[in-house]
Image: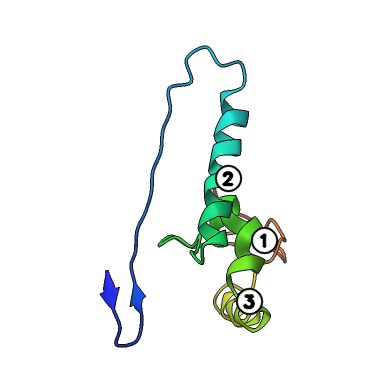
Amino acid sequence: KQWYQRRVAVGTFFFFGFYAGDLPNPLEVYTILETSAREEVLANGGSVSHHHGIGKVRAQYLEDTISTAGKQALLAVKHGLDPQNIFGCGNLTGVVGPTGALKSKL
């Protein structure tokens, strides 16, 4: 938690799990629940950011959580630190995979 003079920023993470039992479509049910929860958080002024970054799961909400200038700043930092788009491919840029001739050794 961090406290500021004029506003409060509270880091709250939520986790949910459910017993899928004999559900024929557990991934679909999970996706519906997760999407509903994230949209409710955004509708009430929250953020879907995470201490590991926006990630691929939350990338669809990036436009709803930061300004155009904020995204441009993130892209500039990303390009400066990772010009070949090796790390977190597609999370900010939508471009998946390294650019240029460099290939992963994995």
Q: Residue at x 67, y 61 (%)?
A: 98
Quadrant assignment for the N terminus:
bottom left
Question: Mark 1: which amino acid?
Answer: Pro
Nearer to me, 98 or 11: 11
Q: Position of residue 46 (x, y in %)?
A: 48, 64
Amino acid carrying label 3: it is Lys
Sequence-wise first label, 1 or 3: 3
CA neighbours of label 1 inside 10 A, class few (<14), some (14 to 19), many (20+): some
Q: Give the image quarter of residue 11.
A: bottom left
Q: Quadrant of residue 16?
A: top left
Question: Residue at label 3?
Answer: 71
Q: Point out which mark residue 21 bears.
A: none
Q: Report whether residue 85 is seen.
A: no
The colour mode here is: rainbow
Of the two numbered discs 1 and 3 in the rendering, the one whose residue sits closer to the viewer = 3
* Res. 36 mark: 2
Disc on the earlier residue, 2 or 1 = 2
Q: Amino acid at mark 2?
A: Ser
- Across and down, in percent, residue 57 comes to 58, 50
Mark 2 vs mark 1, foreground winner is: 2
Of residues 78 and 37, the one nearer the viewer is: 37
Q: Which residue in the structure is indicated by mark 1?
A: 98
Q: Report the residue that reaches farthest toward the top.
A: 22
Left or right for 89, reference 53: right
Residue extending furthest front? 44
Q: CA distance from mark 2 to mark 3?
A: 24 Å
- Which callout, 2 or 3, points to the residue nearer the camera? 2
Label 2, label 1: how many angstroms apart (C-alpha)? 33 Å
- Whether pointer 1 and pointer 3 mark residues with C-beta atoms closer than 8 Å, the reply is no
Residue at (66, 57) in percent of width and height: 60
Which residue is depicted at the point 51% across and 59% down? 48
